[in-house]
Amino acid sequence: MPAAGIDIARIGPGDGTIAPRSRMRSDAPEQSLDGAWRFRLSPSPWDAPDDWRTGSAAGEWDTIAVPAHWNLSGFGSPAYSNVQFPFPVDAPHPPDENPIGDYVRLFDLDAPLTHLRGRMLLRFDGVESAAEVHLNGVRLGSTRGSRLTHEFDITDVVAAAGNVLAVRVAQFSDGTYLENQDMWWLPGIFRSVTVLGRPTDGVDDTFLIADYDPATGQGTIDARIASTGSVSIEVPELGIRASADAAATLDAAPVGRIAVGAVEPWSAETPRLYTAVVSTPTETVTMRLGFRRVSTDDGVLRVNGRPIMLRGVNRHEHDPEHGRVYSPDLARRDLVLMKQHNINAVRTSHYPPHPDFLDLADELGVYLIDECDLETHEYEYVQWRGNPSADPAWREAFLDRIRRTVARDRNHASVIMWSLGNESGTGGNLTAMARWVREHDPSRLVHYEGDWSSRDVDVYSRMYASHDEVRRIGEEASEPLPIGISADEARRRTLPFIQCEFGHAMGNSPGGVREYWDLFEEFPRLAGGFIWEWVEHSITVRDDSGRRVHRYGGDFGESVHDHNFVIDGLVSADREVRPGLVDYAAIIAPVVIGVDETRETVTIGNRYDHVTTDHLRFTWRREVDGATIASGEFDVPSTPPRTRVELPLPARARGDVTARIADVITVGAALAASTTWADAGHVVATGQQLSAVPAVAATRSAPGADRFDRRGAPLRLGGLDVLSGPQVGIWRAPTDNDLAPGWDEPDLPPMAARWATARIDRMLTRVRSIDHGPHSLVVETRTGAPSFDTAIDARWSWSETPGGLLLTLELDPHGPWDVDWARLGIDLTLAGAPTGMQFAGRGPGPSYPDTDAGVTFGWHEVPASDLVTPHVRPQESGSRRGVRSAIVRTTAGAVRVQVAGGDALEHGVALTVSPWDRRTLAETTHASDLPEPLATHVSIDIAQSGVGTATCGPGVLPRYRVPARPASFALLFDTP
Ligand code: GAL
């Protein structure tokens, strides 16, 4: 073994640590060793000097912060890969190119620790991927399991002063074979290092199961305590004070049951916590208990006896500058943003998060699937040959990981399921993990997606199953069992179903989520799902000119990488809300509001699982052409969970009023009082009823010929020069989904490739005729695809009216079109860079036909910065749908456009105002490379394709596609 003192190619857990314990808040003294450490990086074990254990030479080394990843601290660079492994699958060996980081920290013990009567522990909360630990020249042991806690007993080694802690960390090790999650490779001591004082006869470990019996409303605590002292448990708020039997180890400790009487249960909707104090004469541990019961029956997932719906997201820990280093602010911000967007569940993909994250989830009310740090996905590349999950030699390594996961987090009410890991195939080691979990913690469910037989688990879990399959899974629970079905299959059919990943939020995405949700609502067995994923993992760096720019796979010179597949979140790495989150929030809203067309009644559906509508305030308002003409509050009777009420709409919402553009009723449900995650007034759901009116153009006359060029195209529209167009357009800058083959059409190329083959990205226009008539200028064009006889014929008829310049456009496909279009509309370029827009339509954010749940009709103002979505890899974005009227502003002036007739009357048009043309967007790989905007690119579409979720999952559903079709619509242009 080349690197001195670190064996990084063996099979098994680390060594020398004490048994995993639960994380506790104690009054025992502790000392953080976070801060500046000495650091030396060697490119390979072969180059790593042998002098590291004593730290004798460390005075000459660099310094590094702990916690941090060294390759985000100026030592090397990050690398991103998904399923593919960055080195040969040759377990348990890492490659020779394997950076070795040597860390040294000198420390004296703080006074409280030197005075302590008891033992002393050294705790590492996260080291990637393997560490060898020496204190004062004495070997303490090693770690495996990067996102897991490891504690060493240092009592006999530590001194009051002059301690030398030396840690040798290998970026890759045998452990890497179990940690091939889809994320950046980020080595180093990236979570805190702490010295813990352990008082003699203190509270060494706890496992408190706080149960709630929904039938009686009574709570109980099943308490197991590891201590050699005399232990008492108090829950002051409940008047509980009990002594507890304890034993030296938790495994040996008896279960003491404490009846606590009537309690308020914990759920994600009612995150009620009670403070419990576990104490011995030498130590006091403070815990927060949430009384709740997780169960399944008849295929239904329940909390506190009531069916629940998991409105979930997958969350990685990611900070664009610091990687997986925990930031309390960012974690709180994540959970608050989630709660504000109606999310009630997180799968901690794909490892236990920082321990403090669980406190936040308890407090704010979020169900967790706490996932073990395990993924052997690289074996998919070799047809799962030699998968550690199925190799008994690896069993201890697997068991060690799940023990550490469960032990650390078991006292948190938010954890409702333990997940064995992600994408690790099948095998006996997973079964052994599941068995251990069941024996250790009967109060939660076991989750694992990778084994569809579901032999080891309590919920049937899948990722990216199609809508059709999800429907079948919903239906099969109530069907008679088919003849000849296996026992596993028969059992699986009795389990609740979740999609642990669906709706892949990469780029302009995810489409089709509403259709999944409709299924989840329809079938009791379907208990919801988790969008992949919460946050984009871009890493920010400074470019040559000092700008902060976002980077993805391949940007750091990696030879094996997966490009921007890591940029797939509902929020950016800086936590800007992407349109997909707004859509998801509306789809999963806990209240559904419908206003009927006659405006007689409003229906309020309560989709909460545990609470009535009492905490909400319902308001209505009527807006006509942008002015609120009436508004008020509703009295909604207390509506129990999963029921609905119908109420009359106040008469004032109905009276006759003449509108020029639109008359809209909006009913909103908002928080009546502030919560820990939002202020009073925060809107959780909205319903609308819209009556739209077309702009009517009465008299018409032919426009002056001098206002058109020789091809019959207008020189100016409103107050702006037209630099190019208008011309027919059916292409868009491919979204990430457009570039991926949909899982529902595996034999077909991605949409973007089909468009390129059909050449709709480079269509050419020919003017066929120009006719100066008495009432209009009529121009006929044919816009066709090079090499083909497919085209779109257009008849542009321009007239002068009192309302402005009227364009009536008729579009007709010509030739044998067999490709679905990206859109159908017109493109034009206007003078000046865009400075913003105002529109009456559905907004304020962008939407596409399959992502439009979260936009509401209104008179919206959009600043230049929000016209398009700043996707890290540029692509189509920014389309505003249902637009009736808009003012586009540029540095050169402004134009107003209004819908005046044709197919646009019913649904309006989709308007995109972008600083960049589509070709530039399509050809630029990073947002930071987009040029300074010089002109304004406007598209007015009568149809837009949905976006689907083809990067993982189905492409655009048939109903959201744009097959070749004729269209006609009229638009009125003038100067605002
Ligand atoms: C899943 C995997 C995730 C992520 C996702 C694609 O298969 O579990 O970790 O890779 O696909 O973004």
Image (cartoon, rainbow, N blue to C red):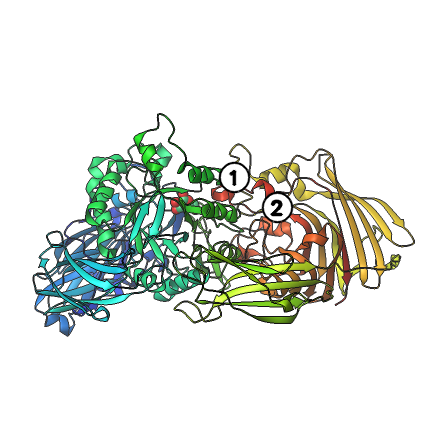
Q: Is residue 451 left or right of residue 855?
A: left
**Which badge, 2 or 1, is on the more N-terminal residue?**
1
* Residue 56 spot, x, y in % from top left: 17, 61
Q: Is residue 369 left or right of residue 45?
A: right
**Residue density around tag 2, few if under 14, some if 14–19, many if 20 or more, within 10 Å:** many
Is there CB contact under 8 Å for labels 2 and 1?
A: no
Residue behind label 2 places its C-beta within 8 angstroms of ligand 1:
no
On the question of residue 833 being in view, the answer is no
Return the residue found at the far right. 774
Q: Quadrant of residue 913?
A: bottom right
The quarter in which the C terminus is drawn is: bottom right
Q: Depth check: 92 or 889 in front?
A: 889
Mark 2 belongs to which amino acid? Answer: Ser
Q: Quadrant of ligand 1?
A: top left
Mark 1 belongs to which amino acid? Answer: Gly
Which mark, residue 945? 2
* Residue 338 spot, x, y in % from top left: 43, 60
Q: Depth check: 799 or 751 in front?
A: 799
Report the number of numbered marks.
Answer: 2
**Residue density around tag 1, few if under 14, some if 14–19, many if 20 or more, within 10 Å:** many
Q: Depth check: 584 or 214 in front?
A: 214
Q: Is residue 379 left or right of residue 864?
A: left
* Residue 837 spot, x, y in % from top left: 65, 64
Residue behind label 1 places its C-beta within 8 angstroms of ligand 1:
no
Residue to which mark 1 is pinned: 742
Circle 1: element type: loop
Circle 2: element type: loop
* Residue 607 spot, x, y in % from top left: 45, 56
The quarter in which the N terminus is drawn is: top left
Return the residue found at the far top. 484
